[in-house]
Amino acid sequence: MNREIDQIDRFLSTRVHTDHPVIDAASRQLLDAGGKRIRPAFVLLSAAFGQQNDIRLTKVAASLELIHMASLVHDDVIDDATLRRGKPTVMERYDERVAMYTGNTLFGEAIRLVSEVDSPEVMQLMAETMELICIGEINQIQDQYNWSQSPKRYLDRIARKTALLIETSCAAGAIVSGASPEVVKQLRLFGYDIGMAFQMTDDLLDFTAKSFQLGKPVGEDLKHGHKTLPLFYSAEDGRFYERLSRVDSTSTPDLTAALVREVQQNGTLERSQQTIDRYVRRAIKRLEPLPDVSDKRSLIEIAEYIGKRKW
């Protein structure tokens, strides 16, 4: 889909421009940092199940990528992150206030794009998505260093923070293309499952990938107090949980590094991968009732890729 994604990037470059030089430069920094553009890809592939393909799809795809970019900027402020995709974050290059207003500007442009699509159903879907993303972000802030939180709390949080935007990408592409309500429903379910697998894989990679692959230091989730899937499994061991519960914002790098090494060796990464595989299998099964259009195979391939990213 390189040609289509390049078209989305070119379109985005025309929409992130503002008259204010600092916000304009910060927005372009985010766009130039790249990314997989997974969400626009899901919009375009899901549209294959309908009959219409026009500029509205480009606008929906771009708006979802802008929402994603904006949420990353805000995430970096919350986590005091200095690197994103191997490059300085907006907050690091400018400051916290510029980063927050840059994110807000991107949210505003996303809303403007959705309004141009002229679909009350898509506007309602996007409004609900943005609201729930904000709830997910607040839950993550409240859950920082809460090592006793329940697995359900974790699943609810990643559903809102990550899975929801992928679910919305699949649904919005299908709606704009004129797909039937039954098709939209199945694609939403597919997007939810694959979005959960996507975030769980990120959680796993935080313990296994090299810094140059992540674009940020290894073990950042643990350092910032985010309890992720490998930590839930590891914390079933009372001795590990006792050490984990001592981690807070003042902890030394030695403590977190020791916990990272233990997670790498205690078998919970393999167990986490098994959980990811279950979500991927269920996502692919969601596609079985759908028509056998050419892009159905592409959705399956992306699902398999997401579940097998290197660790």
Image: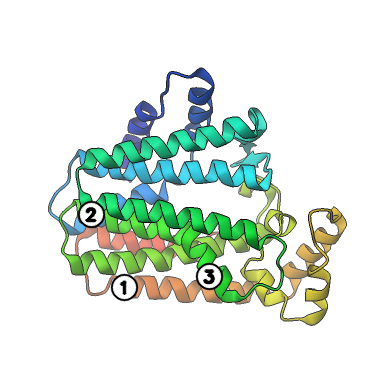
Q: Amino acid at mark 2?
A: Glu
Q: From where the camera sits, is residue 35 visible?
A: no
Kindly state the secondary structure of the residue where label 3 is placed: helix
Q: Label 3 belongs to which residue?
A: 155
The numbered mark at residue 121 is 2
Question: Residue pushed farthest left?
Answer: 51
Q: Position of residue 42 (x, y in %)?
A: 33, 54
Secondary structure of residue under mark 1? helix
Q: Is 214 displayed left or right of 261 in the figure?
A: left
- Per the model, the C-alpha gap separating discs 1 and 3 is 20 Å
Q: Return the mark for residue 182.
A: none
The kind of residue tagged 1 is: Arg
Sequence-wise, which precedes: disc 3 or disc 2?
2
Q: CA distance from mark 2 to mark 1?
A: 22 Å
Closer to viewer: mark 2 or mark 1: 2
Q: Is residue 12 above or below residue 41?
A: above
Percent from the top left, x then y, of residue 39?
39, 50
Pick whichever, 194 or 311, lies toward us: 194
Residue 286 has which mark? Answer: 1
Residue at the image point whose x is 79% and y is 65% from the top: 259
Instruction: Tell me the mark number nearer the camera, choosing from 3 and 2.
Output: 2
